[in-house]
Amino acid sequence: MFQKTNEIKVLRDPIHGYIHISYQVIWDCLNAREFQRLHRIHQLGGVFQVYHTAEHSRFAHSLGVYEIVRRMVEEIRDLSESLDEFEKLQVMCAALLHDLGHGPYSHFFESLQSISHEQRTALLILDEKSEVHQALVKAHPELPQKVVAILQHTHPKKMLSQMISSQLDADRMDYLLRDAYETGTSYGTFDLERILRTMRVKEETLCMKESGMHSVEDYIMARYHMYWQVYLHPDAKSYELLIQLFFKQYEKSATTIPLLDCLTRDCTNEEFLLMDEARLLTGFQEACTCDDPLLKEYARCILDRHLLEWKENPTAQEEQEIKAKLEKAGYDLEAWYVEEKTKNNAYLPYTEEDSIIWILDKNQQLQCLSSKSEIVKALLRMENQLEKRIYYRKNL
């Protein structure tokens, strides 16, 4: 029996109504320094430069993932009956802590570091000095290792990992609903209640009843639209490219900004915990008065939202004209011209290469989703085309 809180803690949430916490270890992890830091990390990186209300944090998302997993282990009968209390606690802790290792503007930050955010998450959980580790050990001496095993897909009970990271998982379900709500779009909405009501376990694998297949199709289409309308929006990418260009120049420059130094090398856990977006923005403000003119200009563009212009699939003639205008205006192409190439199927909302959404048919047999859904079949047949986008200095 694991220690419970004196009463069920409830936190208001715009997506789930309430987040319910009854285990002391969950409450302790939530109040740990490492988790509180997520208040200061945007969930959507530079998307708030396009959708101005997208100011929500990784803290809110992590709580949402925890709440969906809590509901799974308590409300889905197959899961509730096949897991013991310790296993339920392991997966709830893993859900809460799964994004602990995200840095400021996460994907940009990872490009400067030699380890991924998943690896940093494991380092923080296993670090005996971390408050999160101490909270987990207090509940059970093996809990930190069990949580990391779930997040790294090495846990012997594979369905625990599937609940947090698979084609149909609590992570994706929360961020789609939350990101749609916070951006003010309707692309990411789907019927979460129906999915939870029709989720089952067969042969130690999470699956969906055939009667819930249409809600899964809605979920997949929500992912498709959110990627192309929100996550990959060219203006959001433009903002993040400016940050990348800033640090590319910073590494070559003689300018030193102490607040930003840790970003350009691998950092310790202690240094990492001081890395948030407030620190990054303060560093950009300092750069506005530095001696490097290019660094100063990048910083001003970032702070004042002077984004790069962009063009999709330009012709060779259009590219040459833009480059000529840049050079005529006195701009260095290396500093102010960026090409990005993306395969249009690189962000498919569903593939069956790594994992499969299983459908439990009327004969209680598992069938892969693509064998039952015409919508999914069509998505999997999408041609692999190369999309090209160029970004360049505005106001030529």
Image (cartoon, helix red, strand yellow):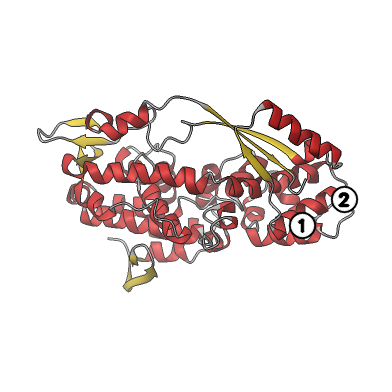
Estimate how packed mark 1 is, as few (under 14), some (14 to 19) or many (20 or more) residues with alpha carbons within 10 Å: some
Q: Which residue occupies 73% across, 62% down?
A: 282
Query: At x 40% / y 44%, what residue is drawn?
Result: 223
* Residue nearer the viewer, 10 or 287: 287
In the rendered image, the vertical position of residue 12 relative to residue 182, given as above or below: below
Q: Residue at x 53, y 44 (%)?
A: 232
Residue 93 seen: no
Q: Would you place residue 100 above or below residue 60 in this image?
A: above
Secondary structure under tag 1 reads: helix
Q: Tell me the kind of residue under disc 1.
A: Arg
* Labels 1 and 2: the sequence-earlier one: 2
Left or right of residue 212, residue 46 in this image: right
Real-space Cα distance between discs 1 and 2?
12 Å
Q: Identify residue for label 2.
A: 292
Q: Secondary structure at mark 2?
A: loop
Task: Please provide percent x and percent y for residue 277.
Answer: 64, 58
Q: Position of residue 27 (x, y in %)?
A: 41, 66
Name the quarter where the C terminus is drawn: top right
Residue located beneath label 1 in the image: 300
Residue type at mark 2 is Asp
Query: Could you tell me residue 217's position as x and y percent?
Result: 29, 41
Left-right relation of 379 to 308: left
Where residue 353 appears, x then y in whole percent?
Answer: 38, 27
Q: Number of marks in the image? A: 2
Q: Residues within 10 Å of mark 2 (few under 14, many from 20)?
A: some
Q: Nearer the viewer, residue 236 or 310?
A: 310
Where on the picture, by quarter, is residue 258?
Answer: bottom right
